Image (cartoon, grey):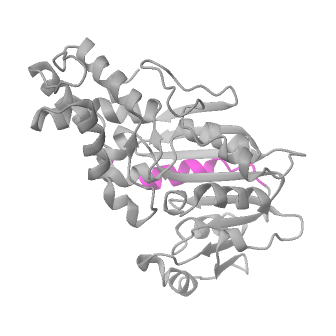
Amino acid sequence: MAKARCGPSIREFLTYHVLMLLAAKRRTMLELVEEIEARSAENRSVRSNGALRVNSREMEGTVYSLADRGWVRLRPPGASWGITRAGRRARREMGRASRGTSDSKERAASKLLARLKEAPKGSYVLDVGTGEGFLARRLAKRGFRVLGIDSGAFDYSKHSIEKARRGVGSDNGRLEFRKADVTRLRRPPGGFDFVVASQAVHCMKNQRKCLRAIHRLLKPGGRFLCLDFLVGLEGFLAHGFHCFLAISREEWSQMLPAIGFDDIYTQKVRDYLIVDASKAHGHPEPSHAAAKDAETACGRKRDQCRRDGECRSTSMSVQDVGSDSKGWFR
C-alpha cells in the first residue's frame, strides 16, 4: 500500500487538483483521497507503492483552506463538497500560471552542470540511470572521467547502454558505459568524487536502498547531484501523476541526513528539481532502521500533519528559478 504523503509540495498540488475534481462532481474528503489514488494507479507499474495516497489530514487542511478562500462551499464532516464560481476562476488561473516550458529539462541540466564548474577536471563521476547518456556526455565534454550505468530494468531502457556506447565519440577514454545495478556496484579505490542522476531516482524500485548505495560509493566529502521531476503543481501539469514517483523537497530534506548527507541544497527549475548534497565526513554507514525513520515526508509521525503545518529543515537551502505561480502558494 502506498504511504500517505503530505507537506507543502503535496498541498500545492491539492489546492489545484481538488478544485478540478469538485468542478466535475461533488465529493467527500474520503472520495477525494480515493479518486487521486485511483487516477495515479498507473504509477504502480514502476513501483508497487507508486500511487499517490494523500494523508487524510493534509486533505482536510487543504479543503478547509479552500473554504476559507471562498472557493468551495463549507460543509459538515462527512458531507460532499462543491466548488464555487470563484473556485472555478481560481483553478483556471492556477493552471495557466503554473505550466512549464518545453526546454525545462535542458535548463535544469545546465543549472546542475553549473554547480560543478569549480570541480577539478579529471574528477571521477558516476552517472546512475544514465539511459543513453544525456548527462554523461555533457560531463565528459567538461573534462570529467565518467562511468554511466543503467540497469535496463524497464522495456524502454533495455537497450539504452548499447545505444549509449554507439554514441561515444572522441572522449579520450573519459567516458564508459556499463549495464549495472547501483546497489551491486563495487566501490572504486577512494570512491567516486561525484554521483549524478538525471530523471533516474523516480524510477528506482527501492529509492532508499539506492540512495544508501550512492552514499557508499562516494568518497568522504563527495557530492550527490540529482535532477528529477518536481513534486507539486508544476510537475503535475507537465508530467501528470508520474511526477509523484519522484521525491519531494521536504522528503529529500528528511531522507538525506538520515542516510549520511549534509549541506543539502535544492533548486526548482520550472517543472524539475535539482538536489545537491555532500557525503558527511566521518559519517558511519547508516543502518536500515535509521534511514527508515525518515520515511514520513513532513518529518513527523505519519498521522500528525497539522491542517496548517509546514515542513522545515535547518540544513536545507532552497532556490526557485522560473515562475512562482503568481504567488498562489505562498
Q: How many marks?
A: 0
Relative height, residue 92 to residue 53 (above, below): above
Q: Which corner quadrant of the image does residue 73 belong to?
A: top left
- Name the residue furthest front: 78
* Residue 114 belongs to magenta span: yes
Residue positioned 68% across, 44% down in the render: 256
Question: Which of the two residues, 15 or 123, is positioned nearer the viewer here?
Answer: 15
Residue positioned 59% across, 70% down in the render: 137
Question: Which of the two residues, 187 or 36, is positioned nearer the viewer here?
Answer: 36
Give the quarter of the figure containing the C terminus. top left
Q: In this view, does 300 lie to the left or right of 321?
A: right
Q: Which corner quadrant of the image does residue 141 belong to?
A: bottom right
Relative height, residue 330 to residue 15 (above, below): above
Q: What stretch is highlighted in magenta?
A: 101-119
Question: Which of the two residues, 309 or 221, is positioned nearer the viewer here?
Answer: 309
Residue 253 in view = yes
Relative height, residue 156 to residue 80 (above, below): below
Question: Which of the two residues, 188 or 250, is positioned nearer the viewer here?
Answer: 250
* Residue 121 belongs to magenta span: no
Residue 324 in view = no
Q: Which corner quadrant of the image does residue 319 belong to?
A: top right
The spot of residue 104 in percent (x, y) is 41, 50
Q: Is residue 24 left or right of residue 96?
A: left
Q: Is residue 190 left or right of residue 213?
A: right
The spot of residue 318 in percent (x, y) is 58, 32
The spot of residue 224 in percent (x, y) is 69, 52
